[in-house]
Amino acid sequence: MRLLIVGTLGGQISAATRIAMNLGAKVALVDTIEQATAALRNGKGADLLMVDAKLDIAALIAANEAEHIVVPVVAAGVGVDPMVAARAIRAGAREYISLPPEPELIAAVLAAVCDDERPMIAEDPAMRQVVTLADQIAGSDASILITGESGVGKEVLARYVHKKSKRADKPFIAVNCAAIPENLLESELFGHEKGAFTGAVARRIGKFEEADGGTLLLDEISEMDLRLQSKLLRAIQERVIDRVGGGKPVPVNIRILATSNRDLMSLVRAGDFREDLLYRLNVVNLRIPPLRERKDDLAALARYFIDKYARANDRPARRLSKDATVQVLAHAWPGNVRELENAMHRATLLANGEEIGADAIRAPDGAPVGHRDSTESAIEAAQAAARGLVGRTVAEVEQDLILETLTHCLGNRTHAAHILGISIRTLRNKLKLYSDDGVRVPPPPTGQAA
């Protein structure tokens, strides 16, 4: 996780930096919005910008967008000033953080942007088998396709492979192909030359060049446009890229890793993914089992997240009680590791006794987790839903299904699209239609494009 702090933050830079670094973030500092855009343009990438609310956030976002630079922004200011917070959000900031910073809030914001910089935990035999294969191939330069459901830890495994490779001392750059609009993804990956389009005021270094010598992770590769797939195929085959508006190829020396939560061969048959690119990416496939099939990992991960958030929030290090452990192991965790992390974060904050009891293991809406058999609950939910369908149009039912799923996923477009069985672009198109009709659409989490 790379955090770029812009401005003085009302004299709270040291406190914000300390908290972010304690949470594993790499922090860089600049004074002005012009310096921030220049740093991003020159290949000094960031996963998140924390910007002083007194600066012109709208101008910063506009300058970045004009150069096809996509980085989420959170504003920060001293004290709780509703007017300042509202102005920052209207300017385009995803969140407003009141300073002095609270570790809990900083942790939540960083986790929303990048929650995959955790150690590889593989105590379950099924996961140990995956890690053993990863160890065998890490030292090569072979492309690897990492597959599995959303939230299982595909980026964690990708980082593990990088750290075990001969490129470990070089950059690891991750690009979420699903989170970046397709009209901006080309510049994000390949960079552009000055004058390549309106707003391209200087050369921009893309992620391929930023990762030179190291590893480039293409997250959710299934969402990449077919035209860009062709350009990516050439980059993999010939080890050169073409900047947007460029006149000559630029050599690059990188290893490609890719992830997908969809069946790429089915997409090939449907004409939505290039077969030759799939073969280039899928030299080795690492499939991560869902968390419900890794009970030993479930217990170990729960302990890890409890310790992590206890430290981040200055809370005592508690253990799960026997009842709480049974509850955690019984739950299906459809959101996999990401859902478990959020639940353990909440449990750390809600627990009061010497142990974390079962009553602290709760869903985001406060409902207890894992008390009832999931099959029984699913059947009852399906029966109740069916009773409400009669007399409604297909479009009405589809809209309700999409919005309810998005709400369940806390606004995460990628997770919702996976559950619904549609592409993220189809989901975004439908959400735009709903929004244009005046329907309230749940906002995306920090760090994900709308």
Image (cartoon, helix red, strand yellow):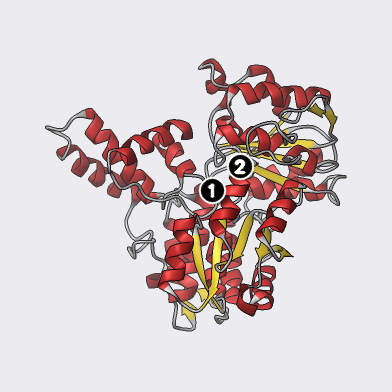
Q: Is residue 173 above or below residue 26?
A: above
Q: Is residue 196 left or right of residue 363?
A: right
Mark 2 residue type: Ala
Mark 1 residue type: Gly
Q: Position of residue 418 (x, y in %)?
A: 46, 37
Q: Residues within 10 Å of mark 2 (few under 14, many from 20)?
A: some
Q: Nearer the viewer, residue 424 or 420?
A: 424
Residue at disc 2, secondary structure: helix
Q: Residues within 10 Å of mark 1 (few under 14, many from 20)?
A: many
Residue 202 is at least partly visible in this image: yes
Name the image quarter holding residue 302: bottom right
Task: Check disc 1 and report the residue beneath it.
Answer: 151
Cα separation, mark 2 vs mark 1, equals 32 Å
Q: Position of residue 320 (x, y in %)?
A: 50, 72
Q: Is residue 16 above or below residue 450?
A: below
Q: Position of residue 326 (x, y in %)?
A: 44, 64
Q: Is residue 201 left or right of residue 364?
A: right
Q: Is residue 126 left or right of residue 164?
A: left
Residue found 57% across the figure and 42% down from its top: 289
Task: Check disc 2 and report the residue beneath it.
Answer: 66
Task: Name, please, the residue furthest toward the left.
Answer: 391
Q: Is residue 260 left or right of residue 88?
A: right
Q: Is residue 327 above or below residue 64?
A: below
Q: Is residue 416 above or below residue 358?
A: above
First of labels 2, 1 by sequence position: 2
Q: Nearer the viewer, residue 384 or 94?
A: 94
Nearer the observer: mark 2 or 1; the answer is 2
Residue at disc 1, secondary structure: loop
* Quadrant that contains the N terminus: bottom right
